Image (cartoon, rainbow, N blue to C red):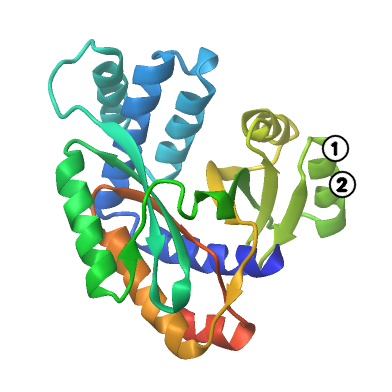
Amino acid sequence: MAGHSKWANIRHKKAKEDAKRSKVFSKHIKEITVAAREGGGDPEGNPRLSLAIDNAKADNVPKDNIERAIKRGTGEDTGGASYEEATFEGYGPGGIAYFIEVTTDNNNRTVGELRHIFTKSGGNMGTTGSVGYMFEQKGMIRVHSEGLDDEEFMLEAIDAGAADVDTDDEMFVVYTSREELFDVRNRLEEAGFEIESATLIREAVTETKVDADIAVSNLRMMEKFEDNDDVNNVFTNMLMDDETIALAEEI
């Protein structure tokens, strides 16, 4: 899982650099709204909402914005857009599989925009289920590693229910089953560890290794998707070696 984690961390750092952009706030607000609509406005009884609030706070979303999003989700505030979640699947250059998660107030608009990106980038949008079977949903928790011993933390994380742990220069990346994400996150926090984020991801069951040209084409395509206001997450089965990853950091 190390290759996946290394690239995920690079993308996460790039995203954090853009954390002041309104798109980042918008993504959090949409997630909070949908979570509150589906599971109620009390974060103590709604694990998804609790995680959404914590992740929003980590990106400095104002408290008032969070509270309004909760009220909009529960129906107390009838103003604003009505959001729905959807997923899209397809292929990029070199046959790379894409699984895209969106939250939108106009599904027809989103379909057209994503189809345009696929086509213009040398890929094609597929039907539901065309690549979904290639991905497994898991939990991913990012924990600040400063001042912590790698081996000791890994043992603590495993005891807390983690399935796997990776490291980079600044973070421990803890992987869990989909069902265990909330509980493992709480156990780690109760143990005194500083949690940066806890989210559900989709990890490719089988990855496809690419050369630099194919990697660059797909990375540019991914950026177009991620610039779309409705897109929450873009997952692929692209595998890059260290040299290609170094190139990716410059894009």
User: The disc labelled 2 sits on which kind of residue?
Assistant: Leu
**What kind of element bears circle 2?**
helix
Q: How far, Cα to Cα, is label 1 from label 2?
A: 6 Å
Q: Which image quadrant is residue 210 in?
A: bottom right
The reply to whether residue 147 is in sight is no
Going 66% across and 66% down the picture, which residue do you hit?
Answer: 168
Dot 1 and dot 2 residues touching (CB under 8 Å): yes
Q: Which of the labelled discs sits on residue 10, or is there none?
A: none
Graded by Cα atoms within 10 Å as few (under 14), some (14 to 19) or many (20 or more), the crowding at tag 2 reads: few
Q: Is residue 125 above or below residue 43?
A: below
Residue 34: horizontal and vertical position, in percent?
34, 27
Q: Which amino acid does label 1 sit on?
A: Asp
Q: Is any part of residue 139 visible from this angle?
A: yes
Depth order, front residue of 74/83: 83
Residue drawn at 37 percent across, 43 percent down: 60
Looking at the figure, which quarter contains the N terminus? Answer: bottom right
> Which element carries disc 1, helix, strand or loop?
helix
Q: Is residue 219 left or right of residue 199?
A: left
When the figure is inspected, residue 1 is found, relative to residue 122, above or below; the finding is: above
Pointer 1: what residue?
A: 159
| Neighbours of disc 1 within 10 Å: few (<14), some (14-19), many (20+) | few
Q: Position of residue 164 (x, y in %)?
A: 76, 51
Residue 37, position in %: x, y?
Answer: 34, 18
Residue 155 is marked as 2
**Nearer to us in this view, 127 or 180:** 127
